[in-house]
Amino acid sequence: MTRGIGIAGIAGRMGRLVAEEVRGAGLVLAGGIDRPGAAVPDGVRLFPDIATLAAAADVVVDFTHAGAVAAHAAALAAAGTAWVLGTTGLAAADQDAVARAARRIAVVQSPNFSPGVNLVLALAERMAAALPSETYDAEIVEMHHRQKVDAPSGTALGLGQAVARGRGVALEVVRDSGRDGHTGPRRPGAIGFAALRGGQIVGEHTLIFAAAGEQIAVTHRAFDRRVFATGAIRAAAWVAGRPPGHYGMADVLGMR
Ligand code: NAD
């Protein structure tokens, strides 16, 4: 890496931590972008837009807002700059834009950069493949801080996708989120989601397989957002100079 790491959303909770961690690791911080008027950390070079940041960096680490993703995809692909994408809550059209960009640049996309969660994701797929859906009901419960704007969390959906993959079904077909009112009995084979919001919880996820005779629950708790920032920097160091492709944290961690 010669030009260094750029940060999209550098004034945000995650962006600030990534900037601190880049400097702490002795890597080059190319600079960042944020919304006009945002309070940017001291000593950071602020770029006017994603295109100029992309031209000045080897990799852009992105923790912004789903609404920014399609424009970032186009600008990074045009500049040939690698992309570490942590933003969650993407609509299908945003996800398509990411997939298109990944044909031209290397993209590491993960709803959760913590090593522990990625291990749980791998485990979720194996558990789902071993525990038949007719007997074991899969439910995912997550809790996050009160500022979080999307639900279920990207990580909860990632867990749901892992369970669906293990069962050979499409999550969209079996997903059951936000039960409320007279819902009727549980649909056989459904993957259920419940989202709790409150306080300053960094991130808690529990995957439950509930059967008539037993229950298995796997819980991951993140205590410090820094775990996502260090994971994102690890991804940035890994992805710089890679051929175009759509990668995940499992690739970065050598888990596949
Ligand atoms: P935040 O609101 O504190 O920060 C987001 C920053 O992005 C803000 O400073 C905002 O001004 C800026 N921003 C928004 N739109 C922009 C645009 N178009 N151009 C430039 N800057 C823009 O939020 P946060 O807690 O840092 O989280 C950001 C995103 O990252 C969310 O989607 C969150 O769910 C996700 N997240 C992912 C992980 C992970 O491990 N993948 C971990 C934590 C958070």
Image (tube, rainbow, N blue to C red):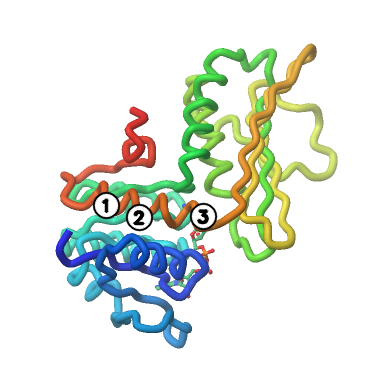
Amino acid at circle 2: Ile
Q: Residues within 10 Å of mark 3 (few under 14, many from 20)?
A: some
Q: Earlier in the sequence, mark 3 or mark 2?
A: 3
Q: Which residue is at 26% across, 62% downward?
A: 74
Q: Earlier in the sequence, mark 1 or mark 3?
A: 3
| Mark 3 residue's CB less than 8 Å from ligand 1 | yes
Q: Which residue is at 32% across, 33% downward?
A: 254
Q: Residues within 10 Å of mark 2 (few under 14, many from 20)?
A: many
Secondary structure beneath label 3: loop
Residue at the right extreme of this rendering? 182
Secondary structure beneath label 1: helix
Distance, label 3 to label 2, CA atoms, is: 21 Å
User: Which picture quadrant has residue 84?
Assistant: bottom left
Question: Residue at label 1?
Answer: 237
Q: Is residue 71 above or below residue 172?
A: below
Q: Is residue 162 above or below residue 14?
A: above
Q: Which residue is at 52% across, 68% downward?
A: 13
Amino acid at circle 1: Ala
Residue 62 at what x, y percent from top left?
A: 38, 62
